[in-house]
Image (spheres, rainbow, N blue to C red):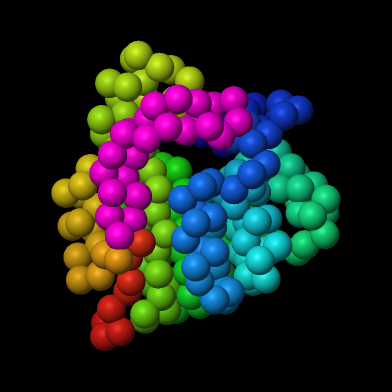
Amino acid sequence: MKDFWNERYAETDYAYGKAPNEYFKEKIDEMQPGKILLPAEGEGRNAVYAATQEWEVSAIDISEKGKEKALKLANAEDVQIDYKLGELPELGYKEEQFDVIALIFAHFAREDKENYLEEFKNLLKPGGLFIFEAFSKEQIDIQKENPKSGGPKDAEMLFSKEEVQTSFKGYKFEQFEDKVTELSEGKYHQGQAAVIRFVAKKPLNK
């Protein structure tokens, strides 16, 4: 996967554009700035936007090319982001470090997905929020009609409503959508796509 993302991010244009994801922007614009973590952040469009809104931003990815373009975008916007390369367990984040964790089209291999979600939950403060948007399993069929809409071709990397509700059992869903929407994000997210979106609050008691 590292080679795949390095090749995609080596292109001159920003693969998913420079503007933040609309759902992510809508949600953090409603919040008081704090400490936010953005896993699988790629070329930095969401991290940089959050930094312009005075969030203390941490970002993660495995792609060196993604980091290069993210830091270039941050420099253009005159903001700072802490961008780390590598796998989550090796990066030294502390338990309950973040006020918000934003998983925006963060898709992981089947064997890693549940473990990563558990690790992300450990990094979130009690009362903290997850902002989530990802492709649902219905995207497999939509891809066949519209390959430009994007997303993994492995259904195991996609999400279902039931899977999400099980993974975030005990969390309060402040919003939950399982829908077909219209994406316009750079070259690789164009047209109708099936997504799951939610904001979920971590319970105060463990």
Q: In the image, residue 71 lies at what x, y percent? A: 76, 51
Start-end of magenta stretch: 175-198
Q: Quadrant of residue 35?
A: bottom right
Does residue 81 show up?
yes
The answer to whether 196 is drawn above or below residue 80 in the figure is: above
Left or right relative to 180: residue 2: right
Q: Quadrant of residue 9?
A: top right
Main SS, magenta region, reads strand
Q: Residue at x 20, y 56 (%)?
A: 165
Q: In the image, residue 138 lies at what x, y percent? A: 25, 30
Q: Quadrant of residue 124?
A: bottom left
Count of numbered circles in the view:
0
Asked if the magenta segment contains residue 197, the reply would be yes
Asked if the magenta segment contains residue 48, the reply would be no
Q: In the image, residue 48 lies at what x, y percent? A: 68, 55
The residue lying toward the viewer, choosing from 12 and 31, is 31
Left or right relative to 140: residue 103: right
Q: Residue at x 49, y 56 (%)?
A: 26
Q: Residue at x 66, y 66 (%)?
A: 53
Q: In the image, residue 33 lies at what x, y percent? A: 58, 74
Of all residues shown, which one is farthest toward the top?
A: 145
Does residue 116 show up?
no
The answer to whether 158 is drawn above or below residue 173 in the figure is: above
